[in-house]
Amino acid sequence: MKETRNILRIKKHKKIRKKIFGTKERYRLCVFRSLKHIYASVVDDENNKVILTVSTLSKEFKDKYNGGSCDNSKAAELIGSLVAKKCIERGIKNVVFDRSGYLYHGRIKILADAARKEGLSF
């Protein structure tokens, strides 16, 4: 069976998740991207709870940014800054970055840089 790019990514993600774990002191910032959208979630792995999530489909993204119409890299930057602002509002300053098996390149890197620029540290 030929392994597709997504199957390889999922295998890589499972390998990464053995090492990355979100605690109450440092929650896990998990990123997922599709061809059209990008999602960022802050997760507490000790209690198996999603603290907050932001995506290009979320209402606050569409309200703030022109109905959500922008290119993928600009959307990733906006999502990164939006998730950082929401984290800081809730008192979260330190997170562990989970790139979900994607290369730290392109939209993933843009999202991470925007979150760092807004004040998140990882």
Image: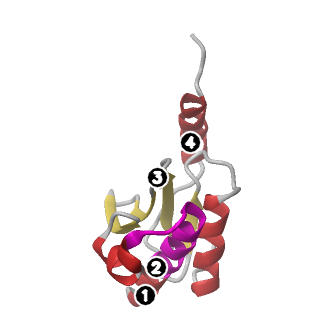
Badges 2 and 3: C-beta atoms under 8 Å apart?
no
Mark 4 / mark 1, whichever is N-terminal? 4
Secondary element at image label 2: helix
Mark 1 / mark 2, whichever is N-terminal? 2
The quarter of the displayed image where residue 56 is located: bottom left
Badges 4 and 2: C-beta atoms under 8 Å apart?
no
Relative image position of residue 18 (x, y in whole percent):
56, 44
**Residue that carries the numbered disc 4 in the rendered image:** 13
Viewer-nearest residue: 57 or 11: 57
Residue 91: mark? 1
Residue 36: mark? 3
Q: Which mark lies nearer to you, 1 or 2?
A: 2
Mark 2 / mark 3, whichever is N-terminal? 3
Residue segment shown in magenta: 68-84
Q: Which mark lies nearer to you, 1 or 3?
A: 3
- What residue is at 43 percent from the left and 69 percent from the top? 69
**Residue that carries the numbered disc 2 in the rendered image:** 82
